[in-house]
Image (cartoon, rainbow, N blue to C red):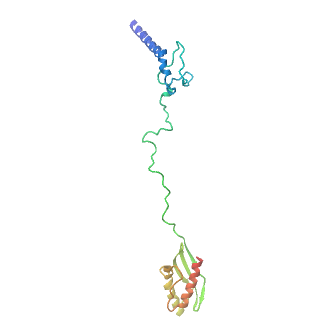
Amino acid sequence: MRRAFLAITGLAAGTTALVVLKGAPGTGQAAQDLPVALAPVTPGGSAAPDGPTPAAPGAVTPSAAPSASAKPSAKPSADRKPAGGGGTRTSSAPSAPRTTTKAPAPTTRTVTGPTVTYRYGSLRVQITLSGSRIVDATGLDMPVGGQEGQRADDVQARYSGSSGEVVAKQSANLNTVSGATYTSTAYKQSLQAAIDKA
């Protein structure tokens, strides 16, 4: 029991001697030569002044071990990249917005020309447009029956419809239907007025 007491007392005395030697005035010089960033922190919490300060005789100086300010911070700084792959990934620089090559679907509308009276009756022409393009044409109020009706049917067959001459030429510059000159002329007049109105 006495030996154990002596061993513990010796151990305590040795530890005290190490602490005193570590803080001895000779080792304080090494702490004073450190840069400001690594200089020991004074009890007030601020770093030691720029120049060396003489230690008071017999005073115990702080340990020359790195101070808390020299330890790496646990908080990530704004300059650091997040761990795990180097931060956010961008495939490429943002490109200019794409422009669609497909034009919007044109609106379809109908325009009707005025009624034109001619030798065998009267008629008017109605055209259907998709955008600015004529896609269909038809004669309205044309004579029916008899020789006048036959002429009107010939003109209608040649000029009207989605595959007629009006759609093919996109104008009122049409060929006159043989044997139906008056009807052809009246049709072209009403058609031209409808085109002008469109």
Q: Position of residue 111 (x, y in %)?
A: 58, 77
Which residue lies at the image location 56% right of the left edge and 76% below the top edge?
A: 110
Work out whether 2 lies above or below 62: above
Residue depicted at 58% across the width and 83% down the height: 190
Name the outermost residue toward the top: 2
Horizontally, residue 53 falls left or right of residue 4, namely right
In which quadrant will I find the C terminus? bottom right
Q: Position of residue 54 (x, y in %)?
A: 54, 17
Q: What is the x, y in percent for residue 59?
A: 53, 14
User: Can residue 112 be seen in this snapshot?
Assistant: no
Q: Out of 174 and 52, give the one closest to the viewer.
A: 52
Asked if 24 appears above or below 137 in the picture, the reply is above
* Residue in front for this viewpoint, 32 or 42: 32
Residue farthest toward the front in the current orientation of the protein: 51
Residue 97: image location, x then y, percent:
50, 57
Quarter of the image with the N terminus is top left
Q: Residue at x 47, y 17 (%)?
A: 27
- Disc count in the image? 0
Q: Compared with residue 54, is residue 189 higher up or lower down, i.e. above or below? A: below
User: In the rendered image, is residue 192 in sight?
Assistant: yes
